[in-house]
Image (cartoon, coloured by chain):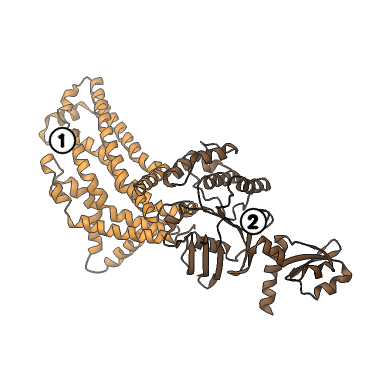
Chain colours: A brown, B orange
């Protein structure tokens, strides 16, 4: 059974269409990056998955309808939202006690062990913690829950580099195993590409590209082309190009790698370039 | 079982956040006790003698205790109303609603825990404070009398605190249910309004009153007055007639009080508002 199964998900706010027939399947144990520009519908998709908003279309998360079964779903789903949402008046110790009180899957010793490696004090009020520390606390709370699905919505937004790095490092070290599924949305693709097993690119409320990292790598290639071969390369229909040290880096979709090797050095494009290739290309196609 | 546990934790977290709601009756109660002590220290001989000998003033010492405990009761009512005006708006303003909703706690449990603060927690706090207040006021007043060379036994003969406590314990559940539609309405509006909850909560009634005063009937005026004053007059005056204060256990009429149609009509209205608040919270997001 898929952890998330969405078919033709639609959501509009007034005349603004946030989700325009989104199809998404996430299997167990996958670490899926939901990528897309601002306004692509990432947050709306996550909100629907978490049962925070009603929607049209079919959606099952862990076999449940999130909108009508949020309470039951949240026993097995953990969620960290884009900005600090922990109640600022609460003490860290109160947050731990409360979580233990209401969440059957919460392991307080686990959370305390994680916090022991941070500067977050148990007596501190959340209001007095820095943004980075609040995120650490939230991660500690989330990781101490025995959840089947962890949803992260721009979890590192506004954090400095050090906290961003340790955030994903802790996640990998302490949380990831093969039965847990993680869905993470971000527009900063650099910091997560090394942990993902799958990517889903969203644009204008639709999936424009989805697949495992292996599939993506097999399909897309980036070639560094010298100026004299540029015309030949362009004839193959690159999805994206950018100048790089006197040569041009071109991203191709579904072109035979052997043929590309004749044009220059072939490598796997970074998610960032892929992002530009896939998303940047859409409006042009639409215009054509 | 686990639902109950979650509910109790939810109530507990409300009190963590809004400690002031529970502290306000205690603070006002302490203040009233202090004022009472000062007045006992400064009471004039003539006044004291008059109160002790004039049969028409036989109640005057007890009335001071009644006034002090009523200050606690009223504070509890106001604190409950203010709490409700804030309850479903604060979590949206500070975005913490996204945290609460990420936990296995239903909107129903959340809303019920919130209404439990004015309807269950505050009455209990009020009763505890009132009893404690009386137990502090009697020794303090006795001390004041001793300091001035009076015999406190003369005072004690005129006090009947257990009856006062009994009357308040008899009235508090009634008041909680009687005012429940107001609390529930405030809660609903706090879940809906983005800001200035009190204006949105009061505006429809004020508009109605203004329009009504140009017409011949006054039924909204009458209904509001009845509802606001009724919470005090029904339980604390004889037969609920608003003329004579309760003066002894014989005047308590739980059967009449707790079968008033207005009481249960209000409870039904409160249930309706709460149902709407639960439905509303399901789709609420930060503001």
For numbered disc 2, what is the local secondary structure?
loop
Q: Relative to A175, say whether A277 is above or below.
A: below
Q: Nearer the viewer, residue B196 or B104?
A: B104
The numbered mark at residue A196 is 2
Q: Residue furthest right?
A: A228
Q: Quadrant of the C terminus of chain A?
A: bottom right
The x and y percentages for residue B201 are 36, 58
Q: Looking at the picture, how far across and down is residue B151, in whole percent?
A: 18, 21
What subunit carries mark 2? Answer: A
Residue at 50% of width from left, 47% of height from top? Answer: A145
Q: Residue A240 falls in which quadrant of the image? A: bottom right
Question: In this view of the protein, which residue sits in the foreground, B188 or A230?
Answer: A230
Using the image, tell me which numbered label, if any, was put on residue B59.
1
Q: Which residue occupies 21% across, 56% down?
A: B264
- x and y, in percent, of residue B87 in the image: 40, 51
Residue A70 location (% of width, % of height): 44, 58
């Amino acid at each position: 059974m898929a952890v998330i199964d969405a078919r033709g998900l639609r959501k509009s706010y007034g005349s603004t269409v946030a989700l325009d027939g989104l199809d998404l399947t996430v299997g167990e144990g996958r670490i899926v990056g939901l990528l897309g520009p601002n306004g692509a519908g990432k947050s709306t998709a996550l909100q629907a998955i978490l049962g925070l908003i009603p929607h049209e279309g079919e959606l099952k998360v862990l076999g449940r309808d999130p909108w009508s079964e949020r309470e039951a779903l949240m026993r097995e789903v953990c969620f960290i939202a884009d900005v600090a949402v922990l109640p600022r008046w609460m003490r860290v110790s109160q947050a731990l006690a409360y979580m233990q009180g209401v969440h059957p899957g919460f392991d307080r010793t686990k959370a305390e062990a994680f916090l022991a490696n941070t500067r977050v004090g148990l007596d501190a009020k959340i209001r007095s913690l820095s943004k980075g520390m609040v995120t650490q606390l939230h991660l500690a709370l989330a990781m101490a829950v025995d959840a089947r699905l962890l949803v992260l919505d721009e979890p590192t937004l506004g954090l400095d580099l050090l906290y961003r790095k340790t955030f994903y490092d802790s996640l990998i070290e302490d949380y990831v195993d093969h039965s847990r599924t993680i869905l993470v949305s971000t527009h900063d693709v650099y910091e997560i590409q090394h942990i993902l097993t799958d990517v889903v690119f969203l644009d204008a409320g639709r999936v424009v590209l989805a697949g495992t990292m292996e599939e993506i790598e097999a399909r897309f290639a980036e070639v560094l082309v010298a100026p004299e071969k540029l015309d030949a390369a362009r004839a193959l229909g690159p999805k994206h190009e950018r100048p790089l040290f006197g040569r041009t880096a071109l991203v191709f979709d579904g072109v035979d790698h052997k043929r590309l090797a004749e044009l220059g050095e072939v490598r796997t494009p970074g998610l960032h370039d892929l992002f530009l290739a896939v998303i940047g290309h859409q409006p042009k196609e639409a215009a054509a | 079982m686990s639902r109950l546990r979650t509910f109790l934790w939810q109530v507990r977290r409300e009190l963590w956040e809004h400690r002031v709601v529970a502290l306000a009756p205690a603070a006002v109660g302490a203040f009233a006790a202090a004022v009472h002590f000062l007045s006992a220290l400064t009471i004039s001989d003539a006044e004291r003698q008059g109160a002790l000998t004039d049969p028409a003033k036989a109640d005057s010492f007890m009335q001071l205790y009644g006034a002090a405990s009523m200050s606690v009761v009223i504070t509890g009512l106001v604190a409950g109303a203010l709490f409700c005006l804030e309850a479903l708006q604060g979590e949206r303003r500070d975005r913490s609603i996204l945290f609460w909703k990420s936990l296995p706690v239903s909107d129903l449990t959340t809303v019920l825990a919130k209404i439990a603060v004015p309807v269950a927690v505050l009455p209990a706090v009020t009763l505890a404070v009132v009893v404690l207040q009386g137990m502090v006021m009697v020794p303090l007043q006795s001390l004041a009398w001793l300091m001035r060379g009076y015999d406190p036994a003369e005072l004690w003969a005129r006090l009947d605190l257990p009856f006062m406590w009994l009357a308040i314990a008899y009235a508090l559940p009634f008041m909680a249910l009687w005012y429940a539609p107001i609390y529930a309405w405030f809660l609903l509006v706090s879940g809906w309004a983005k800001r200035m909850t009190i204006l949105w909560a009061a505006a429809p009634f004020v508009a109605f009153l203004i329009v009504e005063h140009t017409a011949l009937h006054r039924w909204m005026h009458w209904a509001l007055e009845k509802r606001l004053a009724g919470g005090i007059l029904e339980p604390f005056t004889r037969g609920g007639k608003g003329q004579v204060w309760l003066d002894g256990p014989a005047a308590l009429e739980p059967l009449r009080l707790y079968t008033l149609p207005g009481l249960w009509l209000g409870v039904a209205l409160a249930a309706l508002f709460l149902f709407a608040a639960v439905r509303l919270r399901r789709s609420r997001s930060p503001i």
